[in-house]
Image (cartoon, rainbow, N blue to C red):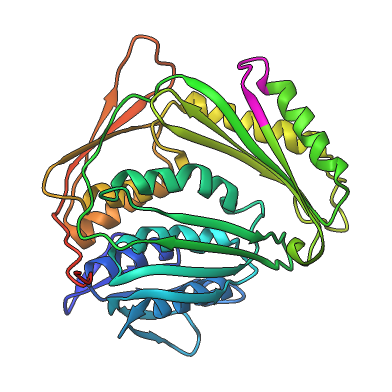
Amino acid sequence: MPATTKNKILTYEGCNYMRHRLLLSTLSGKPMRITGIRIKDDDPGVREYEVSFIRLLDKITNGSRIELNETGTNLYYNPGILHGGDVEHDCSLQRGIGYYLEGVMILAPFCKTPINIKLRGVTNNTTDPCVDRIKATAVPILKKFLSGDTEVIFNIPKRGAAPLGGGEVVFKCPASRNLRTVQFQNSGMVKRIRGTACSIRVSPAIANRMVESAKGVLLKFLPDVYIHTDHCKGASSGKSPGFGLSLSAATTTEVVLGGEAFSPLKTPNSAPCVPEDIGKEAALKLVDEVYRNGCIDSPFQSMTAMFMALGKKDVSKVVTGPLTPTMIQFLRDMRDFFGVVFKIEPHKEEDEILDQVVLTCVGVGYTNISKRTL
């Protein structure tokens, strides 16, 4: 459903894309209302992980006003000032830390003070981008838009698999007055592949089996493949067993693309999960991402679009692979909040197989007025 405006409040219907709409509302300063949240479900209203994300926004901002009706089906959000600072948050175990971390990374450059956040919960699951993929592919995107030689710190002291979690991630990012505009149009050729095979509360041999399986696929294309094994035990291993593999491919033009796979939750009727299958799945997902041939890893297209729109009043141009459904809706919502319209056109080259997309926009000249000046 498209947004409607009533009393200068943007109103949406339904629970889809709630996280991105909350982020857009926070950055634009425009109040928002979401109605009819899962009204036809047996369990209507917002979910636990959505409430947890709203609480995280409340911790990062100062003066936000949040109203939720008794059934949880209507949400009113009036954003405050982005403050940042030292924050600790226990994420809902229904979703991975990656679900929350994506939102924090979008807001971090616009905070009043540099953000230093510690998130606890599930670091690896089958739904959200794992923390290794975010570290390998999303952090380089963030650094491209930050001005100067700013240092972004990303540490993973503890890992925690679903369903009980127990993982921990520390993320530090400086505040920035303005974002840079970027021209990012050549994805280049893949020159090396790196990865991390993690085994959490299971035998260390499982990580080696995943590595061998993934290399069986990747060495057919490239000789420079190195996959690190990370065996977690004791206090750093969280509360649930699991294993998975995260891969990243770096190209000659400093593009980093990712692929990942993790063991699914075991249910009474589920088939046993074999490490060789996880290794092969992660390798094939990485190959598929390289085949899409964008300059941006697919899960982080919307983060890139946000930074492009909030840059200086100059032209930013980025080539991506085929747009994801999330990205398409995000561009529509961005038009509602910021009035930014992207020019989308096909990118044609002689050896192209999949249709690349060229995203072009003029930044709104967003200035972080709350950033402290020295």
Q: Position of residue 243 (x, y in %)?
A: 76, 48
Is residue 198 on the magenta stretch? Answer: no
| Main secondary-structure element of the magenta-colored stretch | loop
In this view of the protein, can residue 148 be seen by the observer?
Answer: yes
Quadrant into which the N terminus falls: bottom left
Q: Is residue 12 left or right of residue 51?
A: left
Q: Residue at x 66, y 22 (%)?
A: 218
**Residue 212, placed above or below residue 297:** above
- What is the magenta range? 218-226
The foreground one among 94 and 89 is 89
Residue 47: image quadrant is bottom right
Outermost residue to the top: 350
Q: Please provide percent x and percent y for residue 124.
A: 66, 55
Viewer-closest of 4 and 170: 170
Measured as percent of width and height from the top left, residue 158 is found at 68, 62
Which quadrant of the figure has residue 182?
A: top left
Q: Is residue 17 visible?
A: no
Q: Residue furthest left?
A: 313
Residue 223 among magenta residues: yes
User: Left or right of 125: which side holds 29?
Assistant: left
Residue 339 to residue 212: above or below: below
Q: Residue at x 42, y 65 (%)?
A: 18
The answer to which image quadrant residue 252 occupies is top left
Reply above or below: 316 against 292. below
User: Please, which residue is most extreme toward the front here?
Assistant: 374
Relative to 340, 264 lies left or right: right
